[in-house]
Image (tube, rainbow, N blue to C red):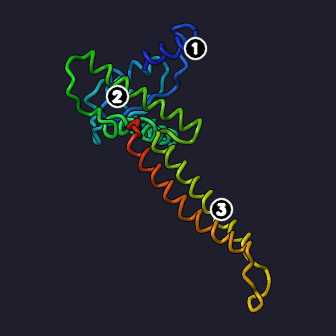
Amino acid sequence: MLQAQENINQARDVAADDLTIESTTADKGYHSVAEMKRLQAEGIRTVISDPVKNRKLESLDKEAAGVVRKAKRSAGSKSGKELLKRRGMHLERSFAHILDAGGARRTTLRGLENLNKRFKMSAAIYKLSQLMRKLFGVGTPKQLAAMGKTLFLVWRGILIVGCGLLGMNRTNPPTRKISPHGGIWSRLQRWVASETTGVFGWNWRFFRKRLTSTVC
């Protein structure tokens, strides 16, 4: 967390010792009395659940017991539960996208340098997908293709309905006569319904084979 604070200060071009982090949250695996004690000494609130339900605080010294109690109160508070919920939404979901959907859980690469490059590339692609989703509403090329398909189908439906409405004769049904204009609009409607389906199907099959997913 302190290293993250230094990175934030470097990005903001402020003093390295400027502390802006108010709270920190993590899963039960990061419940360490020594680490939480260091964070609380810096004035950072620790929202970390205790993996031991019936921990005997009597076996700890007074200072360590106070650290554990403070962390437990923070994790059980309303704001602490909200932070834990947001952690699950933003952090755990990104792990699922990068490791499981992105295939970064296992690798055949050798060497720590190659592994770092592979993981950083996956993380960069995930962040790019989040940025695209924020700006354009879609985060992957497949989602963009699906949106284009939906827009095309909506346009096709509007065009077919419009041709049908323009080709209708508004006289009473018993006296209605087939006009040459009505025949033209009827044939145009059938052509739109048949030809657009074939053209769109060919284009969809063509681009679907060439779409590359960002695995995010």
Quarter the N terminus occupies: top left
Left/right placement of residue 71 relative to residue 147 reads left
> Which residue is pictured at 55% across the width and 19% down the height?
20
Q: CA–CA distance between discs 3 and 1?
A: 51 Å
Residue type of the residue flagged with mark 1: Arg
Q: Position of residue 12 (x, y in %)?
A: 58, 14
Quarter where residue 168 is shown: bottom right
SS for callout 1: helix
Circle 1 packing at 10 Å, graded few (<14), some (14-19), many (20+), is few
Residue type of the residue flagged with mark 2: Ala
Circle 2 packing at 10 Å, graded few (<14), some (14-19), many (20+), is some
Left/right placement of residue 174 relative to residue 208 reads right
Of badges 1 and 2, the one in the foreground is 1
Quarter the C terminus occupies: top left
Q: Earlier in the sequence, mark 2 or mark 3?
A: 2
Residue at label 2? 65
Residue at label 3? 158
SS for callout 2: helix
> Which residue is pictured at 57% across the width and 53% down the height?
152
Q: Is residue 70 visible in the rendered structure shown here?
A: no
Using the image as rendered, state which of residue 5 and residue 189 is in the foreground: 189
Q: CA–CA distance between discs 1 and 2?
A: 37 Å
Work out which residue is located at the far right of the displayed protein and give it: 171
Residue type of the residue flagged with mark 3: Ile
